[in-house]
Image: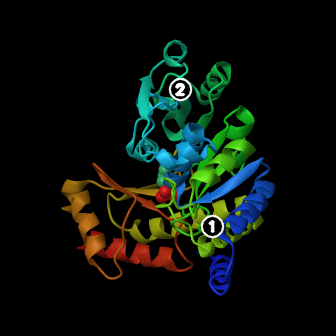
């Protein structure tokens, strides 16, 4: 976490607050910074998925809020493109809803009805499905159903904080602990004022509510706000250059090995920042990628990478501190040399 985030956390740790007031006040600040109607700080993006769903299912009805995850008699179906199913949808299912899988717009027209509580889109999986992100929002509007987009890791570009809401989504979910470098256990639910108010009614610190197990401390609430302010003050072009520079530093330290190739790449949708791909001829070097991963993990300092490829590794550099790209380069060279 950058210094301003740590300072905000330290400062918040010294004061008593009314948590509901702090949630409302910081929500207002975040909404103003991002140009959306309302915002709620959650215990991670996964928690924002839970709280957004609870808002769509129970609203602000005290009886329904108490009863979740028992959704008997409530709207309790969530429509999701079949290809978008992934581990994070467990955070939605926690609310006691059933996921109804669809493939096409015609499927949505067929299954949307009075049991439908919400329509859920995982932006990262958009290209794998048949319904583009804009069309899904329009379909939800057509059926009068709230829509939620999970874009947890889809910053940069910064415009994405408001892009999906402008597109017609009622709620959008982002992580506080990824590129924002806020508290790892923080996230944001952004969107429609009435739904954010309903999410807050289902959230901690309310006791008899599904969000009570997703507590956000005053330190994280303030820390996330500070992280967002800090992030928005950065020059995106300068950050990008910095990330590319770290890739170049690591690449330079392994370029002397025969047959080792490096390439900077940017993932298409999520974590869309410069990463480094390092590949080699395993036979010539006598080293398999999984052996290289083990070597990096078992050394000092231990290094974890983004992904293992059939012929190499992918290395993420955007969370490194100054001087750490050099360390990664040195360790990778050690492993390749062996
Ligand atoms: C990382 C991620 C999450 C979870 O984020 P946390 O802030 O760790 O809870 C949810 N959805 C997607 C698509 C993610 O990439």
- Using the rendered image of the protein, determine whether residue 211 is visible from the camera's viewpoint: yes
Please state the horizontal and vertical placement of residue 107, each as a whole percent of the image. 48, 15
Instruction: Confirm or deny contact between disc 2 and disc 1 (CB under 8 A).
Output: no
Report the Cα–Cα distance between label 2 and label 1: 46 Å
Q: Which residue is mark 2?
A: 116
Q: Secondary structure at mark 1?
A: helix
Q: Residue furthest front?
A: 63
- Ligand 1 is within 8 Å of the C-beta of the residue at disc 1: no
Quadrant occupied by the C terminus: bottom left
Q: Which structural element holds mark 2? A: strand
Front position among marks 2 and 1: 2
Identify which residue is drawn at 44% across, 36% down.
97
Q: Based on the displayed image, in which of its 4 quarters is residue 19 positioned? A: bottom right
Q: Give the labeled residue for mark 1.
A: 242
Q: Is residue 334 left or right of residue 321?
A: left
Lower position in the chain sequence, tag 2 or tag 1:
2
Res 61 quadrant in image: top right
Label 1 Cα crowd, 10 Å radius (few <14 / some 14-19 / many 20+):
some
Height in image: 281 above or below 293?
Answer: above
Q: Is residue 253 above or below residue 192?
A: below
Q: Residue at x 67, y 37 (%)?
A: 170
Q: Position of residue 270 (x, y in %)?
A: 53, 47
Residue 229 in the image, given as x and y percentages of width and height: 74, 67
Residue furthest out toward the bottom: 14
Residue 155 in view (yes/no): no
| Figure quadrant of the N terminus | bottom right
Q: Residue at x 39, y 77 (%)?
A: 330
Q: Nearer the viewer, residue 6 or 255?
A: 6
Colour setup of the view: rainbow
Q: Determine if the C-beta at disc 2 is less than 8 A from ligand 1.
A: no
Q: Residues within 10 Å of mark 2 (few under 14, many from 20)?
A: many
């Amino acid at each position: 976490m950058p210094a301003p985030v740590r300072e905000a956390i330290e400062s918040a740790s010294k004061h008593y607050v009314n948590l509901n007031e702090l949630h409302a006040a910081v929500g207002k600040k975040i909404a103003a910074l991002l140009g959306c109607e309302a915002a709620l700080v959650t215990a991670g993006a996964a928690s924002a998925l839970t709280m957004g769903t609870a808002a769509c299912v129970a609203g602000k009805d005290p009886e329904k809020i108490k009863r979740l995850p028992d959704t008997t008699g409530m709207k309790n179906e969530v429509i999701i493109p079949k290809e978008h199913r992934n581990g994070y949808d467990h955070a939605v299912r926690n609310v006691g809803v059933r996921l109804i899988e669809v493939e096409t717009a015609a499927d949505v027209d067929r299954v949307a009805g009075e049991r439908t509580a919400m329509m859920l889109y995982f932006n990262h999986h958009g290209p794998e499905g048949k319904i583009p992100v804009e069309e899904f929002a329009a379909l939800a509007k057509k059926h009068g159903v709230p829509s939620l987009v999970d874009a947890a890791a889809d910053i940069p570009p910064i415009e994405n904080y408001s892009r999906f809401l402008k597109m017609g989504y009622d709620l959008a979910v982002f992580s506080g602990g990824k590129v924002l470098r806020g508290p790892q256990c923080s996230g944001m639910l952004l969107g429609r004022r009435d739904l954010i108010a309903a999410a807050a009614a289902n959230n901690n610190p309310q006791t008899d509510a599904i969000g009570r197990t997703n507590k956000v401390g005053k330190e994280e609430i303030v820390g996330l706000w500070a992280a967002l302010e800090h992030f928005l003050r950065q020059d995106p072009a300068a950050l990008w250059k910095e990330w590319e520079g770290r890739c170049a530093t690591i690449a330079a330290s392994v370029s002397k090995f025969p047959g080792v190739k490096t390439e900077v790449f940017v993932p298409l949708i999520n974590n869309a920042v410069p990463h480094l791909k390092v590949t080699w001829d395993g036979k010539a070097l006598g080293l398999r990628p999984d052996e290289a991963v083990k070597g990096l993990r078992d050394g000092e300092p231990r290094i974890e990478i983004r992904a293992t490829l059939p012929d190499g590794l992918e290395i993420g550099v955007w969370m490194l501190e100054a001087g750490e790209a050099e360390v990664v380069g040195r360790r990778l060279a050690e492993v390749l040399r062996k």
